[in-house]
Image: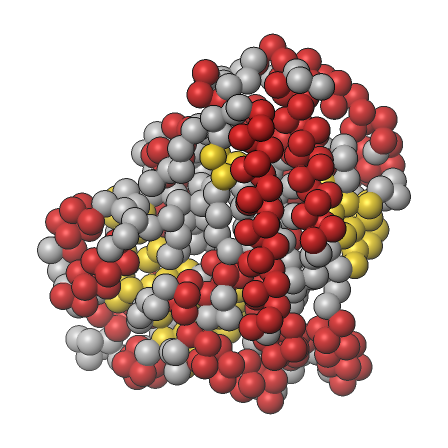
């Protein structure tokens, strides 16, 4: 591995090199079946996986899963892991929540897809409207697709083309959203159209001055962002940022679109509820489907009226570009109904957030005992380590603080101790199925990692 660590991490790079070799050998010796499956898969799948992220988000090879229950899964080699990636928040309900399993079994037996509405869809829309205080909803198969449609709606409703977002805000794998996420000087994505960034402007998160200057032109259809950035570790808004964002978007006639796909794990109505935000549109996904594919976006009554309008603001007739054959399928809607009404209860959110706070507290204690300069991130059920000695205010600071080799070693060490850590752009999250014993297991594995990298064992 090529080392780019600096003194802020407080760790000797030579020590991490030695540990990487040792832990890699241990991982290979304990996962022969998983490695054999990977090699077999290379003949028929690029990178030997059915979806590229399964290979790219960890520096070590992926495990192949046989089954999972609650907050744990077991790989093909029979090793049981505590899952703190939780499917990148998609299994926040737990891997096999009983109400969802029951609802899915019943729905499959009665037909899973009709390309027609079911009563489950109505209940889900009503529940989302109650939680996010937005009356009207539409459904897709992923939050990426929901973001794409919500941005189209904003353009249709305002008659404007441009979109404003923040560097490091990931909204899915649409071309222009990937362009925004990459940003200047960051990872570039191949295969995008050269014009992908034509109608999108990108500024720094928490920069109210830049926000005011850009919106003053009055030519943006929407500002599109997560309430807190969650693909840069965790980047929290500074006090007053969201107040300014809401005031400036209203003053300029710009729609405020919040993507709560990750942050909905923080409260029944996400950070919009927790922080009393007032967006014009909200996108959700992942956990609301109880582990099944689902995305959704909610809108104000005014945006609903625009959605139903069969012509542009200039009077040109047409149809808003939304929909998909499997969108709002009966199976996903049955799962979502069970997830929202039986699993993701207020008590479940309190439980998961309490575990997240306990994990953060105990990680801070381990770091302090070792005399390391690392900081601990906090966002409800989610925690994580910032190796740069500060909590970033924006993507530029997060990128500058990045220690990819140390991150990679952390994930490998935890995997060798029965903990499947979150992907490299995130931090551990505790699902509603997790327990205090799971927190203790994570902390014990993390303590071993700290002891090893500091050489104090």
- Drawn side of residue 453 relative to residue 378, left or right: right
User: Looking at the picture, does residue 296 appear above or below residue 400?
Assistant: below
Q: Residue at x 65, y 62 (%)?
A: 432
Residue 98: where, in percent of width, then height? 76, 72
Instruction: Classify residue 29 by image quadrant.
Output: top right
Residue 125: where, in percent of width, then height? 50, 81
Looking at the picture, tell me which residue is in the foreground, 236 or 300: 236
User: Looking at the picture, does residue 86 appear above or below residue 152?
Assistant: above
- Drawn side of residue 69 relative to residue 384, left or right: right
Instruction: Classify residue 278 by image quadrant.
Output: bottom left
- Drawn side of residue 45 relative to residue 300, left or right: right
Q: How is the image coloured?
A: secondary structure
Residue 323: where, in percent of width, then height? 48, 72
Residue 375: where, in percent of width, then height? 47, 35
Image quadrant where one finds the C terminus = top right
User: Looking at the picture, does residue 139 appear above or below residue 8?
Assistant: below
Report if residue 219 is visible in the image. Answer: no
Q: Residue at x 38, y 78 (%)?
A: 134
Image quadrant where one finds the N terminus = top right
Looking at the picture, tell me which residue is in the foreground, 164 or 349: 349
Report if residue 84 is visible in the image. Answer: yes
User: Looking at the picture, does residue 278 appear above or below residue 174?
Assistant: below
């Amino acid at each position: 591995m090529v080392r780019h660590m600096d003194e802020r991490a407080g760790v000797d790079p030579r020590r991490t090199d030695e540990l990487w070799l040792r832990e890699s050998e241990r991982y290979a010796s304990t996962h022969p079946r998983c490695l054999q499956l990977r090699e077999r898969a290379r003949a028929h799948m690029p990178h030997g996986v059915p979806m590229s992220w399964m290979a790219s988000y960890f520096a070590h090879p992926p495990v192949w899963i046989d089954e999972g229950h609650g907050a744990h899964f077991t790989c093909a080699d029979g090793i049981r892991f505590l899952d703190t990636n939780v499917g990148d928040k998609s299994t926040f309900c737990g891997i096999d929540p009983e109400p969802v399993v029951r609802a899915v079994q019943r729905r499959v037996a009665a037909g899973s897809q009709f390309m027609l509405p079911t009563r489950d869809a109505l209940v889900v829309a009503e529940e989302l409207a109650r939680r996010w205080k937005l009356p009207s909803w539409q459904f897709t198969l992923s939050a990426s697709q929901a973001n794409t449609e919500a941005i189209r709606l904003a353009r249709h409703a305002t008659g404007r083309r441009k979109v404003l977002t923040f560097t490091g805000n990931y909204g899915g794998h649409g071309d222009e959203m990937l362009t925004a996420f990459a940003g200047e000087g960051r990872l570039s994505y191949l295969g995008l159209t050269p014009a992908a960034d034509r109608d999108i402007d990108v500024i720094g998160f928490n920069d109210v001055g830049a926000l005011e200057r850009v919106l003053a032109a009055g030519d943006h259809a929407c500002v599109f962002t997560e309430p807190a950035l969650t693909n840069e570790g965790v980047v929290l808004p500074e006090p007053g940022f969201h107040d300014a964002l809401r005031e400036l978007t209203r003053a300029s006639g710009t729609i405020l679109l919040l993507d709560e796909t990750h942050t909905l794990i923080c409260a029944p109505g996400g950070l919009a509820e927790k922080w009393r935000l007032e967006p014009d549109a909200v996108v959700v996904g992942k956990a609301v489907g109880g582990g099944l594919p689902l995305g959704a976006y909610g809108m104000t009554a005014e945006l609903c009226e625009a959605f139903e309008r069969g012509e542009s603001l200039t009077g040109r007739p047409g149809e808003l570009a939304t929909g998909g054959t499997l969108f709002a399928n009966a199976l996903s809607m049955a799962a979502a109904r069970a997830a929202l009404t039986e699993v993701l209860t207020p008590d479940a959110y309190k439980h998961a957030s309490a575990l997240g706070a306990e994990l953060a507290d105990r990680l801070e204690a381990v770091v302090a005992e070792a005399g390391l300069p690392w900081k601990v991130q906090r966002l409800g059920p989610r925690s994580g380590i910032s190796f740069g000695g500060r909590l970033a205010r924006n993507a530029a600071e997060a990128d500058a603080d990045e220690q990819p080799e140390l991150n990679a070693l952390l994930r490998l060490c935890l995997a060798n101790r029965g903990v499947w850590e979150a992907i490299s752009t995130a931090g551990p999250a505790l699902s509603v199925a997790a327990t205090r014993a799971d927190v203790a297991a994570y902390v014990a594995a993390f303590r071993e990692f700290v002891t090893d990298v500091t050489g104090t064992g």
